């Protein structure tokens, strides 16, 4: 009997969105690494479980960093954007995550 994969709702809250930048595209092609914006409270283990369950790939390594918010001008004043967490996920050789690419 095949084992059913159960995806809980908390895994969907871990990965916020994929990051599609020039740098992340190069990392994807050269090193099989994908960049994601993740929840500030997420740790490496929960990011690994979420990416494995959502995209059905083998995660080899997870690197995380907190990106500081930038000051942005609004009219005469300004505000500081919130800090956010970024994760670089390395997946197994020969595997791929299908993410819709941006077209210019």
Image (tube, rainbow, N blue to C red):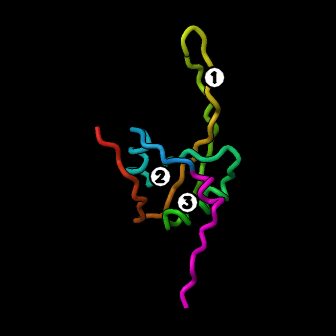
Q: Which residue is mark 1?
A: 80
The location of residue 100, given as percent across then percent down, is 37, 51
In magenta segment, residue 13: yes
- Label 2: few (<14), some (14–19) or many (≥20) C-alpha neighbours in 10 Å: many
Residue in the image at 58% along x and 57% along y:
61
The reply to whether discs 2 and 1 touch (Cβ–Cβ < 8 Å) is: no
Mark identifier at residue 96? none
Residue in the image at 67% along x and 43% along y:
40
- Label 1: few (<14), some (14–19) or many (≥20) C-alpha neighbours in 10 Å: few
The location of residue 70, given as percent across then percent down, is 59, 24
| Relative height, residue 65 to residue 77 (above, below) | below
In magenta segment, residue 83: no
The label nearer to you, 1 versus 3, is 1
The location of residue 38, given as percent across then percent down, is 60, 47
| Relative height, residue 23 to residue 62 (above, below) | above
Whichever of labels 2 and 1 marks the residue nearer the N terminus, that label is 2
Q: Which residue is mark 3?
A: 51
Quadrant of residue 76 within the rendered picture: top right
Q: Secondary structure at mark 1?
A: strand
Query: If the image is split into quadrants, where does the N terminus sit?
Result: bottom right
The label nearer to you, 2 versus 3, is 3
Q: Which residue is mark 2?
A: 33
50 or 34, which is in the foreground? 50
Residue in the image at 56% along x and 48% along y:
16
Q: Secondary structure at mark 3?
A: helix
Give, as a single range, the part of the protein colored magenta: 1-15
- Label 3: few (<14), some (14–19) or many (≥20) C-alpha neighbours in 10 Å: many
| Relative height, residue 10 to residue 26 (above, below) | below
Q: Distance between the Cα atoms at labels 2 and 3?
A: 12 Å
Query: If the image is split into quadrants, where does the C terminus sit?
Result: top left
């Amino acid at each position: 009997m095949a084992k059913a994969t159960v995806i809980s709702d908390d895994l969907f809250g871990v990965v916020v969105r994929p990051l599609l930048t020039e740098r992340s595209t190069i990392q994807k092609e050269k090193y099989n690494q994908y960049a994601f914006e993740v929840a500030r409270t997420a740790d490496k283990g929960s990011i690994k479980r979420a990416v494995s369950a959502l995209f059905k790939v083998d995660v080899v390594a997870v690197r995380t960093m907190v990106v500081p918010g930038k000051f942005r001008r609004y009219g005469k004043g300004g505000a500081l954007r919130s800090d956010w967490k970024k994760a670089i996920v390395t997946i197994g050789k020969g595997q791929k995550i299908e993410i819709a690419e941006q077209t210019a």
